[in-house]
Image (cartoon, helix red, strand yellow):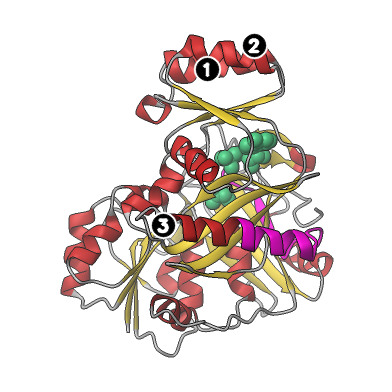
Amino acid sequence: MNVLVVGRGGREHSIVMKLADSKQVNNIYVAPGNGGIGKHATCVPIDEMDLDGLVAFAEKEAIDLTIVGPENPLNAGIADRFQQKGLAVFAPTKAAALLEGSKSFAKAFMNKHEIPTADHKTFTNADDAKHYIEEKGAPIVIKADGLAAGKGVVVAETKAQALAAVDDMLVSKAFADAGAKVVVEEFLDGKEFSLMAFVHKNNVYPMVTARDHKRAFDNDQGPNTGGMGAFAPVEDVSDADLTFAVNEILQKTADGLVEDGRSFTGILYAGLIMTTKGPKVIEFNTRFGDPETQVVLPLLENDLVQVLMDVMDGKDPQLKWEKNACVGVVVASKGYPAAYQKGMLLPEMATTKSCFTIHAGTKLVGEKLVSDGGRVLLVGAKNVSLQAAAESAYAGLEVLSHTEDFFYRKDIGKQ
Ligand code: AMP
Ligand code: GLY
């Protein structure tokens, strides 16, 4: 088979590494890829938003299956475009991807289908939003409706912060059209976890749970980032909570989408919080999470291509998961998530049986690998326990322990 992966980050590198294990896959292409993916696949310089270019490439190279990593092309309708040409694509249509593309849509959908989530109200008018905040008090959460690269959420500890967030989004248009509507939401307290599933119509096949570390610095200090590391599985989620999340959240969501004429194919990702009243939804993504994928896919024993084909054929893929734990630590450019320098030279990273390196913001300049983004690498490891996996991953990071150009959290996998 010829397989095309759309995207350029760590998630896509992880998907590619899993595809490289498949005996059914002859050629793996990535558009546009990054500096490290080229070891396992052919990078083609087509931007992930160049839908015409991607469709033309898939036709020319007789691509048998396309997997889409990031949310922006999904919301631009990449799956619809491929389907119109009869090209197989494991990704939701634009109508189904709205579950991630619009938070107000997702909230209304959850209310309609009685899927547990925080109480909320949607506003386009700043004064109305502010009245609601005055009435509800803090802590309270303000969310830009549209896609904002993970930056559109403000967890306000005080009313003043909440009112300022409303002004930022609705008056100063900090997120342009993505912030033309805001969702004001009840603050939920509890531990978070991510649950992804392979979904086709009413069929839902859950993966192992994972936990992302969103803050920049140790002990969850500092600003929110795209994710500084992750681990899987999450041991503090009880079997009862997991069963509830699968049946009352993921399954109901898949069923609701079919009922509403937005049938879903692809990866459904629920960001969940364990409240005293059980798991509730914080957000939906309609794609693989990043960096969760980098610690979940290494635990999948099945051939990924076979899984995707089975799911699209309406067959149970019989998922099998290693009993091990996996930990991934992100290496970021100094300064990230604020301003940082690109083009810094990267050392040779360890690749052993128990430790792997995934590339995100890297690029090749001649033979040299240099940084090309905020999150640069993810060093991961599998082992019999979370603690052992973390130790293996941190051993792989030794070579960066004295760097001035990069930093990484020292507490990933320590819950
Ligand atoms: P999101 O981009 O929607 O995943 O939100 C980013 C982060 O904000 C989440 O990972 C949570 O830590 C936090 N968050 C979002 N919504 C809520 C909520 N209703 N209550 C508490 N924390 C929240
Ligand atoms: N880790 C959260 C996301 O992929 O958006």
Nearest the camera: 299 or 35? 299
Q: Residues within 10 Å of mark 1 (few under 14, many from 20)?
A: many
Distance Cα–Cα, label 1 vs label 3: 34 Å
Q: Secondary structure at mark 2?
A: helix
Q: Is residue 386 visible?
A: yes
Which circle, 1 or 3, is nearer the viewer?
A: 3
Quarter of image, ligand 1: top right
**Which callout, 1 or 3, points at the residue further toward the start of the chain?**
1
Residue pointed to by mark 2: 134
Query: Which quadrant would the N terminus be assigned to in this image?
Result: bottom left
Task: Residue type at mark 3: give it.
Answer: Glu
The structure residue drawn at horizontal position 51% and vertical position 82%, both measured from the top left corner, is: 316
The magenta stretch is 225-248
Task: Residue type at mark 1: give it.
Answer: Val
Q: Is residue 21 above or below residue 182?
A: below
Q: Which mark is residue 259?
A: 3
Q: Quadrant of residue 25?
A: bottom left
Q: Position of residue 36 (x, y in %)?
A: 46, 64
Check if mark 2's residue and mark 3's residue have beta carbons within 8 Å. no
> Is 123 covered by the magenta stretch?
no
Task: Locate residue 380 relative to residue 255 in the image: left or right.
Answer: right
Residue pointed to by mark 1: 166
Q: Secondary structure at mark 3?
A: helix
Q: Is residue 347 visible?
A: no
The structure residue drawn at horizontal position 52% and vertical position 52%, both measured from the top left corner, is: 345
Q: Residues within 10 Å of mark 3 (few under 14, many from 20)?
A: few
